[in-house]
């Protein structure tokens, strides 16, 4: 039995494990890997046990293994004959979130869980690496990229800055993410932007604190913050083309710690989402302009910090067509949607697509059971879609690197 195998038990996101996936040769091993990862989640740049497991398995498949990119990143290389070099990427990190599930493979690490399915992404790519290393039904080189720190910490950028594409000069790179709400085992993609850019902002409002019973003796920074928060909502509704999706969200307001004191400072934090550099500039400029106007009208000072974090994830045309061909081959025409509506969520795979042509697609995880979406404390990757994910990766390798 594989070191990372666990007994497969039915859980809320899976069907009867005695029917379906467990009857497919070797899939039970991959399910075991996935559940082991789910049980032992590790967050950004701390994926030490995860990367050790990934490296050990890749070595057991006979791959050339490289470690240490972005601290915990792992790269496996599989060569077979002459041909192009492609990159296939999976993310490995978990989230800082307390799990609210009670199945056997629930997280044993307090305050950490795989609530985005990266455990499934890693397991599926490992399964594809194992099968491709046995079958060798391609001609060229496959670079299996196991990336740390996708959640908020830009592990993709860290790997690139660490020389990922200099050491492994792939001709194209591909990514895959499970997607709750899409039919289990279906595939969705679109040409151009599929995930939005993410920027963060922080605004400190500085005034004169005072007794709550004597507001005229100070400047009310909380009132200023509340009005500014409301004013921000007009940016997207009135300054952005209604046909171009964007979002400005204030997500934090910190100020005051007493019932009867108007504080001297308050901090607003939030994020913006957009698909184009033009809309990014409009949003950034208007955030600054409105903050300046708030300062003048309320007689307070402010400090603003705007941080560009993740670029939009933009699929290139040729590589998207190749991904669609592979998905049809693996899953069937009726399970492939090549014109999905882009998400305003963000993904650091966008950094890789700024460097190389490629495609990022979605693999349906099944219905939203009880409203359970990504980043939910009750989320669990659907093991029933593992065969579909492996089949897609294998078909993609064979489509990109056909035998002569």
Image (cartoon, rainbow, N blue to C red):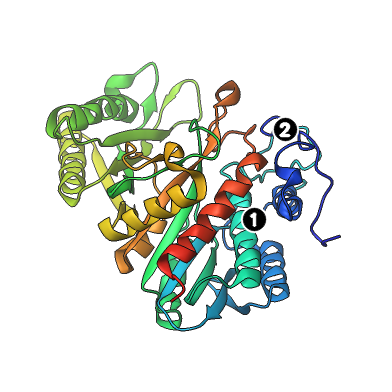
Q: Tell how many labels.
A: 2
- From the viewer's perspective, tell me whether residue 133 is left or right of residue 4: left
Residue at (72, 32) in percent of width and height: 101
- Percent position of residue 322, x then y: 36, 58
In the displayed structure, 347 sits above or below 291; it is below
Front-most of residues 337 and 56: 337
Q: Is residue 382 left or right of residue 164?
A: right
Is residue 26 left or right of 122 when viewed as pictured? right
Figure quadrant of the N terminus: bottom right
Q: Where is residue 6 shown, x and y percent of the image?
A: 82, 50
The residue shown at (32%, 68%) is 355
| Label 2 crowd (10 A; few <14 / some 14-19 / many >=20) | some
The quadrant holding residue 288 is top left
Q: Identify which residue, 248 or 165, lies in the foreground.
A: 165
x and y percent of residue 172 in the render?
37, 68
Q: Quadrant of residue 201?
A: top left
Which type of secondary structure does the marked residue at label 2 adopt? loop
Can you identify the residue that label 1 sits on? 123
- Provide the secondary structure element on which disc 1 rests: helix
Above or below, 68 relative to 245: below
- Say which residue label 2 marks: 101
Q: Is residue 163 visible?
A: yes
124 in relation to 72, above or below: above
| The label number, if any, that marks residue 69 in the structure image | none
- Quadrant, the C terminus: bottom left
The CA distance from mark 2 to mark 1 is: 20 Å
Residue at image x 44%, y 71%?
Answer: 401
């Amino acid at each position: 039995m594989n070191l990372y195998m666990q007994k497969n038990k039915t859980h809320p996101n899976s069907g009867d494990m005695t029917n379906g996936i467990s009857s497919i040769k070797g899939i039970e091993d991959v399910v075991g890997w996935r559940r082991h990862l789910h049980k032992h989640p590790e967050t950004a740049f701390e994926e030490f046990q995860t990367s050790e497991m990934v490296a050990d398995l890749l070595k057991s498949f006979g791959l050339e293994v490289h470690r240490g990119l972005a601290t915990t990143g792992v790269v496996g290389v599989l060569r077979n004959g002459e041909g192009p070099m492609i990159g296939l990427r999976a993310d490995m990190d978990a989230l800082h979130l307390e799990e609210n599930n009670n199945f056997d493979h629930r997280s044993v690490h307090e305050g950490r869980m795989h609530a985005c399915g990266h455990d499934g992404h890693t397991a599926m790519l490992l399964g594809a690496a194992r099968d491709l290393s046995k079958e060798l039904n391609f001609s060229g080189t496959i670079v299996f990229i196991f990336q740390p720190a996708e959640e908020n910490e830009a592990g993709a950028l860290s790997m690139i800055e660490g020389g990922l594409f200099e050491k492994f000069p792939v001709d194209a790179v591909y990514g895959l993410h499970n997607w709750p709400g899409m039919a289990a085992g279906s595939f969705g993609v679109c040409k151009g932007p599929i995930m939005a850019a993410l920027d963060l902002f922080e605004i400190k409002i500085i005034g004169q604190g005072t007794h709550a019973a004597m507001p005229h003796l100070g400047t009310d920074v909380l009132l200023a913050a509340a009005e500014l928060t409301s004013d921000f909502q007009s940016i997207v509704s009135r300054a952005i083309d209604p046909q171009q999706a964007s979002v400005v969200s204030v997500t934090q307001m910190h100020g005051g710690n007493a019932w009867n004191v108007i504080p001297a400072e308050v901090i607003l934090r939030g994020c913006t989402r957009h698909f184009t550099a033009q809309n990014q500039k409009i949003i950034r400029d208007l955030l600054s302009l409105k903050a300046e106007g708030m300062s003048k009208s309320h007689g307070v000072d402010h400090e603003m910090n705007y941080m560009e974090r993740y670029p939009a994830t933009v699929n290139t045309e040729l590589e998207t067509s190749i991904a669609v061909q592979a998905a049809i081959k693996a899953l069937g025409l009726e399970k492939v949607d090549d014109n999905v509506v882009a998400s305003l969520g963000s993904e650091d795979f966008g950094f890789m697509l700024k460097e190389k042509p490629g495609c990022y697609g979605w693999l349906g995880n099944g219905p939203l059971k009880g409203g359970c979406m990504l980043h939910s404390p009750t989320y669990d990757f659907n093991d029933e879609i593992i065969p579909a994910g492996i089949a897609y990766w294998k078909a993609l390798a064979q489509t990109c690197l056909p035998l002569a």
